[in-house]
Image (tube, rainbow, N blue to C red):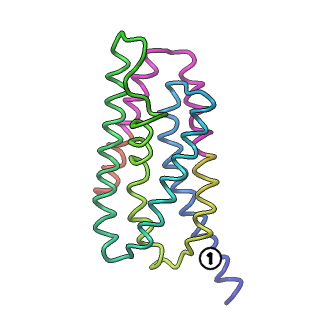
């Protein structure tokens, strides 16, 4: 039972880390369309990983009972924040100002973007004890998958954005809003 059990636990841990990473990948492509700098990419990768890890730890500590309720609220709050980030990106793309007021790679924009993708992890973290997924190995995997998927998504989104300037920001906003709608529809199933 020992090795078999360990392999199953490792598989479950990897599956959770992969699912969280893919969620981050989708959002990173949308943000990357606005063509972020290398420094901003690193900042986003670390911020996204930090936010996901923090929410997993908080959710884990809350436990299954209270965590389910908070996880659902957190998921919908994350979706609402994602819509807000997308709307702000679209609004800024339509202005003729040289400097946009909202930037998803620093300050309040970075906090909002990081929270929008990580709040649903409260529910995931709360389910970890029931699923018998150990926290420390998951956090190590999350650090790697989240950061890697963020950088890949930003790079891919940036390549899409190289050809289109103003439209790229509008597209980024629309993608983020579409992702929020898709996430909401998935949660309602």
Residue 36: x and y, percent?
Answer: 55, 27
Residue at x 53% of width, y 63% of height: 16
Q: Which residues are magenta?
A: 149-178
Q: Is residue 161 above or below residue 9?
A: above
Q: Residue furthest right?
A: 3
Q: Nearer the viewer, residue 188 or 133?
A: 133
For this view, does 42 lie left or right of residue 120?
right
- Neighbor class of circle 1 (other Cα within 10 Å; few <14, some 14-19, many 20+) is few
Question: Does the segment drawn in magenta span residue 156?
Answer: yes
Residue 183: x and y, percent?
Answer: 36, 49
Q: Nearer the viewer, residue 1 or 146?
A: 146
Q: Name the chief secondary structure element in magenta.
A: helix
Q: Is residue 67 above or below residue 23?
A: below
Q: Residue furthest front?
A: 107
Residue 48: x and y, percent?
Answer: 51, 47
For this view, does 71 lie left or right of residue 169?
left
Q: Where does label 1 land, which residue? A: 8
Q: Could you tell me which secondary element the residue under label 1 belongs to?
A: helix
For this view, does 186 lie left or right of residue 146?
left
For this view, does 10 lie left or right of residue 170?
right
Q: Quadrant of the N terminus?
A: bottom right
Question: Does the segment drawn in magenta span residue 115?
Answer: no
Q: Quadrant of the C terminus?
A: bottom left
Q: Quadrant of residue 138?
A: bottom right
Q: Quadrant of residue 182?
A: top left
Q: Quadrant of residue 17?
A: bottom right
Q: How many marks?
A: 1
Residue at x 59% of width, y 45% of height: 149
Q: Nearer the viewer, residue 160 or 42?
A: 42
Residue 115: x and y, percent?
Answer: 40, 48
């Amino acid at each position: 039972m020992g090795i078999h059990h360990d392999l199953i636990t490792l598989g479950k841990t990897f599956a959770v880390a992969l699912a969280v990473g893919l969620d981050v990948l989708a959002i990173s492509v949308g943000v990357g369309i606005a063509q972020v700098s290398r420094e901003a990419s690193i900042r986003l990768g670390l911020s996204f990983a930090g936010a996901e890890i923090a929410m997993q730890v908080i959710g884990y500590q809350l436990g299954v009972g209270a965590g389910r309720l908070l996880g659902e609220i957190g998921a919908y709050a994350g979706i609402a924040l994602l819509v807000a980030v997308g709307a702000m990106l679209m609004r800024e793309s339509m202005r003729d100002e040289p400097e946009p007021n909202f930037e998803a790679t620093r300050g309040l924009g970075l906090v909002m973007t990081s929270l929008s993708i990580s709040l649903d992890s409260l529910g995931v973290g709360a389910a970890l004890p029931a699923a018998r997924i150990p926290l420390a190995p998951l956090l190590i995997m999350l650090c790697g998958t989240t950061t890697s998927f963020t950088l890949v998504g930003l790079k891919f989104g940036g390549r899409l954005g190289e050809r289109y300037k103003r439209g790229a920001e509008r597209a980024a906003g629309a993608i983020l809003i579409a992702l929020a709608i898709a996430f909401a529809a998935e949660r309602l199933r």
